[in-house]
């Protein structure tokens, strides 16, 4: 779990999962504080590092995602937005 943004007033939580059976990574963005349970812009995006990917975004009350990418044995880039706050992970969850 990663706070959105990395520092300052938290607006959301980014969660990243890996399913070894399917070889897929998954990203979800949850609201926190003022963005939890209220319809605000939320986005979850995931891709194989440096490649193309998948995004789920919109005005959601609870969460954006899940967004999936097949990344077995590779690093991923993940980004999340909750309200006006962003978080980006580059070259993460390699394996």
Image (cartoon, rainbow, N blue to C red):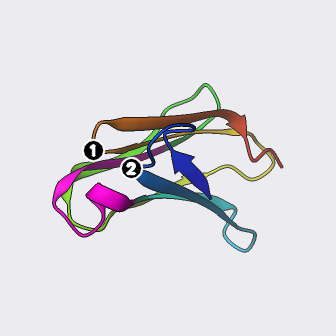
64 over 37 or under it: above or below: above
SS label for mark 2: loop
Query: In percent of the image, x 16 and y 60: which residue is there?
Result: 39
Given residues 75 and 32, the one toward you in this image is: 32
59 over 94 or under it: above or below: below
Query: In percent of the image, x 50 and y 37: which residue is there?
Result: 8
Residue span colored magenta: 31-45
Q: Which residue lies furthest to the bottom in this view?
A: 21
Q: How far apart are marks 2 and 1 (CA)?
A: 7 Å
Q: Mark 2 points at which residue?
A: 11
Q: In x, y percent, where is residue 29?
A: 42, 56
Marks 2 & 1, CB-CB < 8 Å contact? yes
Which comes sooner in the sequence, label 2 or label 1? 2
Query: In percent of the image, x 29 and y 68: which residue is there?
Result: 62
Q: Mark 1 points at which residue?
A: 83
Q: In this view, does 75 lie to the left or right of 65?
A: right
Q: Quadrant of the N terminus?
A: bottom right
């Amino acid at each position: 779990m990663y706070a959105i943004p990395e520092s300052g007033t938290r607006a959301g939580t980014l969660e990243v999962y890996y399913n070894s059976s399917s070889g897929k990574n998954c990203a979800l963005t949850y609201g926190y504080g003022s963005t939890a349970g209220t319809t605000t812009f939320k986005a979850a995006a995931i891709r194989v590092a440096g490649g193309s990917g998948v995004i789920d975004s919109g005005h959601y009350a609870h969460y954006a995602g899940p967004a999936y990418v097949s990344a077995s044995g590779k690093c991923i880039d993940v980004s999340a937005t909750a309200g006006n706050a962003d978080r980006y992970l580059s070259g993460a969850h390699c394996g």
